[in-house]
Amino acid sequence: MTDVTHGVLHTLFHSDQGGHEQVVLCQDRASGLKAVIAIHSTALGPALGGTRFYPYATEEEAVADALNLARGMSYKNAMAGLDHGGGKAVIIGDPEKIKSEELLLAYGRFVASLGGRYVTACDVGTYVADMDVVARECRWTTGRSPENGGAGDSSVLTAFGVYQGMRASAQHLWGDPSLRGRKVGIAGVGKVGHHLVEHLRAEGAEVVITDVREEAVGRILAAHPDGVTAVADTATLIRVEGLDIYAPCALGGALNDDTVPALTAKIVCGAANNQLEHPGVEKDLADRGILYAPDYVVNAGGVIQVADELHGFDFDRCKAKAAKIYDTTLAIFARAKTDGIPPAAAADRIAEQRMAEARGGH
């Protein structure tokens, strides 16, 4: 256990991935809860980020994930113009096996003990129904059901924001935001992807889809007999002839040393988190003349939606804020051009600047 602690403390206090304000280790033996709550920054306001419920191989891996995800939320919330810092929680274990009402209530008490420094929401392995349970012990809970004063499914505005990012990318690259007649490839047509298809088809774009779940593909093809085709897998999708835009909407790491050289699309703009598998991929994209819309900027519609719950949820107000992702994306491309850096680096600079100004720095 000493090695694990030393590794975590070293990451926190000495590495570039550190700089977090607070990390809380939570345990409730009666329910089997083991959780990590990481608060990266409260410079802009209370830290906001979801709760991931996942069977991590080691505790160290769980802590590292919480630190990484919390840091990412600081940047996402800053770029979304929200008055929130970044935080994330992970519950260790297989949700199919250990998730229980008792465990979620115990988790809610830990979040509540932070007195509003951290506001939680859904993430991988947690759902609206779970947040309703957590909220019974903790008022700093978002992502609840409409019946309980929440915003419900946040994928609607996530997809809308990605669509706005695509329009901004088209404007920057081709001088016209219209996607009519453009060929867009979507990898992953689940919660967010299927809404994205609706936006694209409504505008007259041609859509090519793939998903590991056949039923997800079947549902889209049945709803759109014209203008949508399916391919076997992502490896096929990224090589489709004449693809204008590629939208990774499934798992992270979609842009890597294998996929970037094979891409036929001129724009990458999708909903998946952490699309760049490692540092340097953004430069590989730029070297190939591919415009990359930073994932945490264009997929911020969901966090905009849950943040609004704290003020009494209003869908129209949220949609108006998510529509601004268009302007934010254009501003990032302009900054990237001015500074001579890839868009992902430009987005980081703008987010860091906003956080520094909030702290009273320059």
Image: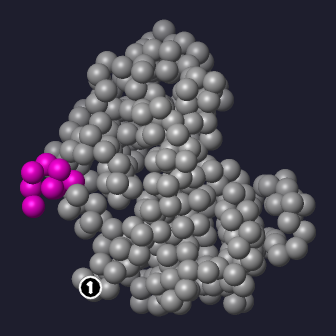
Q: Is residue 44 visible?
A: yes
Task: Bin the neighbour count of mark 1 within 10 Å (Cα to Cα): few under 14, some 14-19, many 20 and up.
Answer: few
Residue at figure coordinates x 28%, y 30% from the top left: 117
Residue at figure coordinates x 28%, y 60% from the top left: 351
Q: How many marks?
A: 1
Residue at figure coordinates x 46%, y 63% from the top left: 325
- Residue 348 location in percent, x, y? 30, 65
To which residue does mark 1 refer?
338
Closer to the camera, 14 or 342? Answer: 342
Closer to the camera, 63 or 266? Answer: 266
Q: Is residue 316 left or right of residue 280?
A: right
Q: Quadrant of residue 197?
A: bottom right
- Residue 57 location in percent, x, y? 49, 40
- Residue 13 location in percent, x, y? 16, 45
Check the image and name the residue furthest to the left.
361
Quadrant where the N terminus sits is top left
In this rendering, the answer to whether 161 lies above or below 135 is: below
In this rendering, the answer to whether 112 lies above or below 19 is: above
Coloring applied to the structure:
one colour
Q: Is residue 27 visible?
A: no
In this rendering, the answer to whether 123 lies above or below 333 is: above
Q: Quadrant of residue 80?
A: bottom left
Q: Which amino acid type is marked by label 1?
A: Thr
Residue at figure coordinates x 35%, y 59% from the top left: 79
Quadrant where the C terminus sits is bottom left
Closer to the camera, 140 or 229? Answer: 140
* Magenta region includes residue 331: no
Q: Callout 1: helix, strand or loop? A: helix
Q: Is residue 221 left or right of residue 305?
A: right
Q: Magenta stretch?
A: 355-362
In this rendering, the answer to whether 234 lies above or below 222 is: below
